[in-house]
Amino acid sequence: MKITRIETFQVPPRWLFCRVETDEGLVGWGEPVVEGRAEVVRTAVEVLSEYLVGQDPARIQDHWQVMTKGGFYRGGPVLSSAVAGLDQALWDIAGKRHGVPVHTLLGGPVRDAVRVYAWVGGDEPAQLAEHIEAQVEAGFTAVKMNASGRISPLPTAAETAAVVERVSTARDALGWDRDVAIDFHGRFTPAGARRVLERIAPLHPLFAEEPLLPEHTHVLPRLVEASTVPVATGERLYGRAEFLPALQSGIAVAQPDLSHAGGISEVHRIASLADTFGAQLAPHCPLGPISLASSLQVAFSTPNFLIQEQSLGIHYNKDADLLSYVMDPAPFRFTGGQAHRTELPGLGVLVDEEAVRAADASTAAWRNPVWRHPDGGFAEW
Ligand SMILES: [Mg+2]
């Protein structure tokens, strides 16, 4: 079997899909994207396609080596995301070729259902209790929200109190049997995060996500040691070598993104690395159905898996949502706050190709907001 054609589709709300075609008629889908930089990743996919077209799609491990390392310069979000999407498509083809789901090829299922969480509150958390009640009503047992919107480098007493108030509101709405995860979104300095973590610890968040920016990983050990709140990070780490210092810092939860961190191949390796530190895997996925399907394949076959992010109804999903480009929503029908394992071959997602082709470049590319502090200085979003 040979790869004959690779196409990309830039679709609302902010996703990029790739379609890998073979001479035997089998087609694989992937989702290679950096949110806000979809066109750049699209170009990277086109460059990698020069190598892949004509190759046997079954040689996933070897293609991963060449795509990741064969250009001499390596790493970073653009290249790692381009590789990620193509890797997903190759696994999709491999599963379809053998008539089995990808999790079978990864060693077989270790669970039949995967706990997922829903987003609440948006970028600037508001109307929280109502959002949470709706998600509890929909069956979710865990939600995630941002700790804050724009925040001062050393949060004021009022800003700190507002974070605590939000987490407290969430805890009241959820009760003690459900979970809330708090995404710090890299908006906090080490000192700000440390002060806030201490205050929210009694409210028992499931984890605190990205309490620090990746460039502050060298001070992460002290933050982890200063708090009992489990620390999660990883959506802006692009391979196992970048996870190593975070894991050595003592993070509890590794959050690689299947569309950023080298795809199924590399996230599978990151999960094993995390296991050697007693850390759990909770793949980042505010993205589309192919990225989520890939995440679920890893989740079904990873022992040290905690919980899966998914984007249904997330605040970013304007003009299209998780189910806009799938023929069959069954793999994403969450009951009891869980996604359920199927025997569908490959990634287990049936892409609505007509809808994808129709949506390609139908809206302006999404860009993330640029925030400013009151004095005009740049603020982390
Ligand atoms: Mg996050």
Image: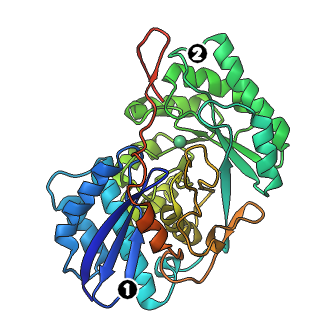
Identify residue type, mark 1.
Leu
Q: Is residue 266 visible?
A: no
Q: Residue at x 51, y 50 (%)?
A: 254
Q: Is residue 101 visible?
A: yes
Residue 230's x, y, as percent? 62, 41
Q: Which mark sits nearer the N-terminus, 1 or 2? A: 1
* Placement of 203 over or under 47, stated as above or below: above
* Placement of 188 over or under 105, stated as above or below: above
Horizontal side, residue 29 vs residue 165: left or right: left
What colouring method underlies this structural image?
Answer: rainbow
Residue 288's x, y, as percent? 51, 59
CB within 8 Å, label 1 to label 2: no
Q: Quadrant of residue 140?
A: bottom right
Q: Quadrant of residue 29?
A: bottom left
Tell us which disc is closer to us: 1 or 2: 1
According to the image, label 1 marks what residue? Answer: 26
According to the image, label 2 marks what residue? Answer: 155
Q: Residues within 10 Å of mark 1 (few under 14, many from 20)?
A: some
Quarter of the picture holding the N terminus: bottom left
93 and 248: which is toward the camera:
93
Identify residue type, mark 2.
Pro
Q: Is mark 2 within 8 Å of ligand 1?
A: no
Residue 32's x, y, as percent? 37, 59
Residue 323's x, y, as percent? 59, 64
Most extreme residue toward the left is 72
Q: Secondary structure at mark 2?
A: loop
221 and 157: which is toward the camera:
157
Q: Residue at x 58, y 71 (%)?
A: 300
Q: Is mark 1 within 8 Å of ligand 1?
A: no
* Placement of 273 over or under 182, stated as above or below: below
Q: Residue at x 76, y 66 (%)?
A: 335
